[in-house]
């Protein structure tokens, strides 16, 4: 399922227009992104939790040349599924 399919699904299930569904989806994605940028977490009970993880700086290797390269520290988004989502899959 891609973003367009998800918008179609939201519009059908909520009985709203596709334009309204698109605005709603973009608002949710924007809210999650904004919260994560601030270092917070977003918890959707039954679905899961979005959080920010930290990756430490490390030394890697260029696979083509074998030369050592420095990989900088980074913040990465993480998702931890909730119990209801796990149960729905099994």
Image: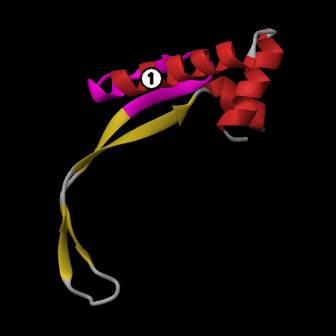
Q: Which quadrant of the view contains residue 51?
A: top left
Tell me the residue at 35%/21% (across/down).
Answer: 35
Which quadrant, please, contains the N terminus? top right
The stretch drawn in magenta includes residue 59 = no
Which quadrant, please, contains the C terminus? top right
Q: Is residue 68 left or right of residue 51?
A: left
Q: Position of residue 29 (x, y in %)?
A: 50, 25
Start and end of the magenta stretch? 36-51
Tell me the residue at 27%/90% (across/down).
Answer: 65
Q: Is residue 36 above or below residue 68?
A: above
Q: Position of residue 5 (x, y in %)?
A: 75, 34
Q: Count how many numbered circles sit on residues in the image.
A: 1
Q: Which quadrant of the view contains residue 13?
A: top right
Q: Find the residue positioned furthest to the top.
A: 15
Tell me the residue at 83%/18% (across/down).
Answer: 12
Rate crowding at label 1 as few (under 14), some (14 to 19) or many (20 or more) other CA atoms within 10 Å. Answer: few
The stretch drawn in magenta includes residue 49 = yes
Residue hosting label 1: 30
In this view of the protein, which residue sits in the foreground, 34 or 18? 18
In this view of the protein, which residue sits in the foreground, 2 or 82? 2
Q: Position of residue 22 (x, y in %)?
A: 63, 21
Q: Position of residue 40 (x, y in %)?
A: 32, 22
Tell me the residue at 39%/39% (across/down).
Answer: 77
Q: Which quadrant of the view contains residue 15?
A: top right
């Amino acid at each position: 399922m891609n973003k367009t399919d998800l918008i179609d699904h939201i519009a059908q299930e909520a009985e709203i227009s596709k334009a309204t569904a698109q605005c709603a989806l973009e608002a949710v994605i924007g809210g999650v992104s904004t919260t994560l940028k601030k270092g917070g977490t977003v918890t959707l009970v039954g679905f899961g939790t979005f959080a920010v993880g930290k990756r430490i700086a490390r030394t890697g290797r260029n696979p083509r040349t074998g030369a050592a390269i420095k990989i900088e520290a980074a913040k990465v988004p993480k998702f931890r599924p909730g119990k209801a989502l796990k149960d729905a899959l099994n």
